[in-house]
């Protein structure tokens, strides 16, 4: 069955719900740019039959390269859902993959680690008790501030991968990443604690089960239907003028991160990870989400997708998660609902550290995507969160 992908329409009509708030949406984003929350943004909203797709501002505050609708943003942790979770869904559909299996079933080197008993389903819902994060770059920096040449080089070689415009990392560094993950200690199993560690292992899991490289598996299963407009390492196939930069990295890479993934761990994996690494425009991401949630989806079994997007954490209203996906939940003392009180309990989405977000609400027929590079020039100030820009946008939409 051929499904027509949503086309770009900018309609302003008082006949369509939130359309009367378009001017307010434009004003909010324009004001955010003036306040230096981010230098530019893309927004894509589909609500019922109304579609609004617009770009604002510039790549950086020097106002040289204007943001266009086809420019690519670093999606950051959104990758966990539209790469990591999607890959696992496809394994369930094509290989009868059992998400209740412990990871030691597939990773033999985890048999002697206490992490080996962790179930895939708990790892996806962030309830396996794994540590949130490992600062891998610190193991590569000498006391004098120089990088260890054992793993990092300023020359391209046959056994290394691009880390930035000027640096390369050995292909074998992934073994160091996995070794450090195995050595971490468990927190309380069953309690929610957001962790990206397992998502670093998903590419290897896909290769073990399918014999196919992670990127190829995703391209063949999903991204080819969007003409490969969601991509890892966009510098390989796109001019930098179409890729929005993220942060001026003064700790590790010592340069503006542009065309390479912002997340340091994913960069050390050659830019291909289920933790972070995908780049896309707001329109391409929205089109993927539309195809995934269509009742006759050509991409994935709808029942499998629905199961992954349902809440998996019971009796905890402060922490609601699907299998990779974020859910509507109470925050603080339980008096406020994130990200908005008008979203249905079946809605789901995710955010990304670089300043990205999407949210889908089937009940309200809503697809919402906001892409920014709010970490530019530095991650030090989180104005996007402090000023609640995403929540204010949802208020105008809903």
Image (cartoon, rainbow, N blue to C red):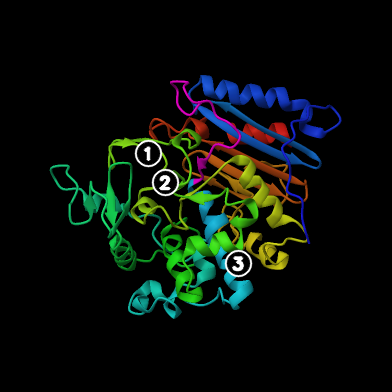
Mark 3, other Cα within 10 Å: few <14 / some 14–19 / many ≥20: many
> Which residue: 45% across, 33% down?
382
> For residue 33: magenta?
no
Question: Splitting the image into 4 quarters, where does residue 296 fall?
Answer: bottom right
Q: What stretch is highlighted in magenta?
A: 58-75
> Which residue: 72% across, 37% down?
8
Give the numbered dot on residue 261. Answer: 2
Note whether 294 is above or below 236 in the view shown: below
Point out the image quarter for the N terminus: bottom right
- Whichever of callouts 3 and 2 sits on the residue coming sooner in the sequence is 3
Mark 2, other Cα within 10 Å: few <14 / some 14–19 / many ≥20: many
Q: Do the residues labelled 1 and 2 touch (CB within 8 Å)?
A: yes
Mark 1, other Cα within 10 Å: few <14 / some 14–19 / many ≥20: many
Question: Splitting the image into 4 quarters, where does residue 376 fall?
Answer: top left
- Whichever of callouts 1 and 3 sits on the residue coming sooner in the sequence is 3
Give the numbered dot on residue 89. Answer: 3
Q: Nearer the viewer, mark 1 or mark 3?
A: 1
Image location of residue 179, percent across then percent down: 30, 67
Q: What element carries label 2?
A: loop
Marks 3/2: CA–CA distance: 24 Å
Q: Are marks 1 and 3 in contact (CB under 8 Å)?
A: no
- Say left or right for 241 vs 91: left
Image location of residue 128, percent across then percent down: 47, 66
* Residue ID for mark 1: 257
């Amino acid at each position: 069955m051929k499904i027509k992908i949503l086309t770009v329409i900018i309609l302003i009509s008082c006949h369509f719900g939130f359309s009367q708030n378009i001017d307010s949406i434009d004003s909010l984003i324009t004001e955010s740019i003036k306040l230096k929350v981010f230098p530019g943004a893309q927004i894509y909203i589909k609500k019922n039959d109304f579609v609004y797709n617009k770009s604002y501002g510039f790549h950086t505050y020097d106002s040289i390269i204007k943001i266009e609708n086809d420019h690519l943003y670093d999606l950051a942790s959104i990758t966990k859902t539209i790469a990591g979770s999607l890959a696992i869904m496809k394994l369930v559909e094509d290989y009868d993959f059992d998400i209740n299996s412990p990871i030691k079933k597939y990773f033999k080197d985890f048999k002697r680690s206490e992490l080996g008993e962790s179930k895939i389903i708990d790892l996806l819902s962030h309830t396996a008790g794994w540590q949130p994060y490992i600062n891998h770059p610190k193991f590569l920096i000498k006391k004098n501030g120089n990088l260890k040449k054992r793993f990092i080089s300023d020359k391209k070689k046959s056994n290394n991968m691009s880390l930035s415009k000027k640096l390369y990392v050995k292909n074998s560094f992934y073994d160091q990443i996995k070794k450090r993950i195995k050595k971490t200690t468990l927190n309380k199993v069953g309690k929610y604690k957001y962790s990206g560690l397992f998502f670093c292992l998903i590419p290897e899991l896909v290769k073990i089960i399918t014999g196919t490289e992670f990127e190829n598996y995703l391209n063949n299963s999903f991204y080819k239907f969007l003409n490969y407009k969601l991509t890892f390492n966009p510098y390989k196939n796109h001019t930098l003028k179409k890729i929005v930069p993220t942060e001026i990295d003064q700790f590790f890479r010592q340069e503006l991160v542009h065309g390479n993934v912002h997340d340091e761990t994913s960069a050390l994996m050659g830019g291909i990870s289920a933790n972070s690494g995908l780049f896309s425009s707001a329109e391409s991401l929205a089109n993927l989400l539309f195809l995934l949630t269509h009742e006759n989806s050509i991409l994935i079994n709808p029942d499998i997708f629905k199961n992954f997007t349902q809440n998996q954490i019971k009796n905890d209203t402060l922490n609601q998660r699907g299998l990779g996906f974020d859910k509507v939940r109470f925050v603080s003392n339980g008096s406020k609902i994130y990200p908005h009180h008008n979203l249905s309990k079946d809605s789901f989405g995710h955010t990304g550290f670089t300043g990205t977000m999407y949210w889908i609400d089937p009940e309200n027929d809503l697809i919402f995507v906001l892409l920014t590079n709010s970490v530019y020039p530095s991650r030090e100030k989180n104005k996007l969160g402090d000023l609640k820009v995403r929540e204010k946008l949802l208020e105008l939409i809903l």
